[in-house]
Amino acid sequence: MKTSILSGFIICLLLLAGSCNKVPTNPYKAEQQKVLLNRGRLVGDLASPANMHMAKIEGVALVEGLMGTGADEPPSTYQQMVYQELQKDPDRKSKAKHLIASMSTAIVLLEASIPPAAQAGDRLDVDVRLLPQSEATSLAGGYVENVPMHQYMAIDIIRKGSRLGVANGYVLLDPDLIERESPVAYKKGKIIGGVVLTKSRPLWLQLRDGEQSAGVASRIEDVINKRFNYKKAGYAGKRKVAEAKAGAVRINLVVPEEYKDNINRYVNVVCAISFFETEDELNDRITDLGVRLLNPEKSEAASLELEAIGSGNARVVDILTSGMNSSEEIVRFNSAIAVAYLNIRGARNQAITILADLARNSQKLRPASLAVLGTCMKSSFEADEQLRQMLSVNSNETRYGAFRALWTRNPKDYMIQGENLADQFSYHCLNCGGPPLVHVTQSKRPEIVLFSKDNIFLQGQFMIDASSQITVRSDGSDVIVKKYQSDDGIDEQRRVGYKVDEIIRAIVDIGGTYPEVVRMLIEAKKQKVLVAYNEEQKLQTCSLVFDALPGKNTGFKRIREIENLAMRELAEEEQVKKENHKNMWNPKNWFAKKEESENLEEFSDEEIGFDGDDESVNVPKRDE
């Protein structure tokens, strides 16, 4: 009996010892199995790009510098907001009420749209609009100073988030609306590049439901960083672009330099990266992609996947090179785009030739071709030369698109380098051949470009009002540019020749602004005195164009859209006037979104950064 008990005890000890020596379970085994289950899938199958919408920021400002066209606005919440901002400025605090009541000021609403992955320091255009019930008649000559821009969220109160930008600059009126004598032509405008962002917008991949795990997030981070990296100022070596965050729910992304103007392509390429595959599976996929690339209907998606694999794979280089020799235009285009972004040295000259040819001859593919030539292969002299040659073609949008691409590559390129006139605008005088042309921008940055500057003049007898203070008139063999400081007389004047270049410089020299220079050019065209010598040295009307970027709607359709928008806005303005008091106290009507801005969404609390310093604007109850 004792022997059996002792034997049983020994067996128990042995079993216990065996269990103690058992190999512990790998805590990452489940995660590894999850990764293996996703074998053969792409990053886009497991995660989706987030924060890709346009985000709207707004502000309420006092526009100053109006020459008697402002208004003493009636009491309102907008007026209260402006008054509170003026109280924060020691130099304007004591005269805040006087400024608001002045006929040289008006209260305006500001609005800007922040694109995905925008960085602190980036500049954005600002739309400026008078209050619907305002009695002010014109924003001409107006400017705003140091206006904070926020995102407002309307619930039961108007909640103001962190300051996301600061607005400064002169208001530029829309020349199309002025030319067509629109009823709202002087009641709205734009400050070009008027907002400087004070906070960057993050871009990330959000793991899909059912895929949120540390193993999946870590694997996605690794495969993206294996494909992409970037250099950061002040750091030695290259940095990774992807970083898993927020408990394996999302992967933050940094945008490489060559993709900064094409965020959509960047996220598409990221989503086309393979999550997990063997070498044999990769080779089979590349073979399939080579077939799909040559199919015009599947070419674009195939080129993105090949770009995602990268130029380190020799078969990818061979397939893309073969695609550039295709008889199908769209196949050559997609192949050349991928080669350009990959910067494949042995194939990039062929890609440049293809893209330059499409920029000249294909209206549909011209915008993307020029954009890629501007942002990729920046060490290529061949790309520079192709763009320089396009500066003298007959197409306005092609030659200005080439100018913008050259400027993106190198603002100091000898063919297009310009100067900053009085910190007002960028001014470029080109002697590039081709038809004389004056180009003016109404977006991104204030800029005037004279193509064949020495051949552009004003002619005949004219009297041009650049503003209520500045006039330009012919006087025999000279042109007199005058600035009237007050009703008492002339403050300054310059006597110059008839060349447009001299007249522009004279306006700036006496204190004129970018909107005043633009107004002078518009009036010169309207009076039919803006002329130029063509290549045969015959005098003809000189073209004045605005924002002639490839793909931009600048034709008859654009004119109709402007007219329809103007009439719709006038009708909306009249409706708001009828419901003035009711609407002013309804939070849902504050900074309401436009019909044409359906893709604008609010920042999340995390994006906008609500914190203890954020403000809420209390909305009083409306009297019934």
Image: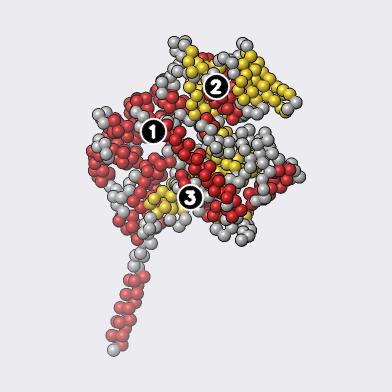
Q: CA distance from mark 3 to mark 2?
A: 44 Å
Tag 3: residue type? Glu
Asked which quadrant contains residue 147, the reply is top right
**Where residue 546 appears, x then y in whole percent?**
49, 29
> Residue 518 versus residue 112: which sits nearer the camera?
518
- Above or below — where is 75 with respect to 352? below
Is residue 127 among the parts visible in the rendering?
A: yes
> Residue 79 versus residue 396: which sits nearer the camera?
79
| Residue position marked by numbered label 2 in the rendering | 527
Asked which quadrant contains residue 213, the reply is bottom left
Query: Where does the N terminus fall, quadrant-wise?
Result: bottom left
Q: Residue at x 39, y 33 (%)?
A: 368
- Above or below — where is 255 with respect to 490? below
Q: Residue at x 35, y 61 (%)?
A: 30
- First in sequence, mark 1 or 3: give its number: 1
Q: Residue at x 33, y 51 (%)?
A: 45
Pointer 2 local density, CA inside 10 Å: few below 14, some 14–19, many at least 20:
few
| Residue position marked by numbered label 3 in the rendering | 601
- First in sequence, mark 3 or 2: give its number: 2
- 375 vs 290, left or right, is right
> Residue 7 versus residue 448: which sits nearer the camera?
448
- 68 vs 455, left or right, is right
| Residue position marked by numbered label 1 in the rendering | 368
Tag 1: residue type? Ala
Disc ID at residue 570: none
Tag 2: residue type? Gln
Q: Viewer-nearest of labels 1 and 3?
A: 3
Q: How is the image coloured?
A: secondary structure
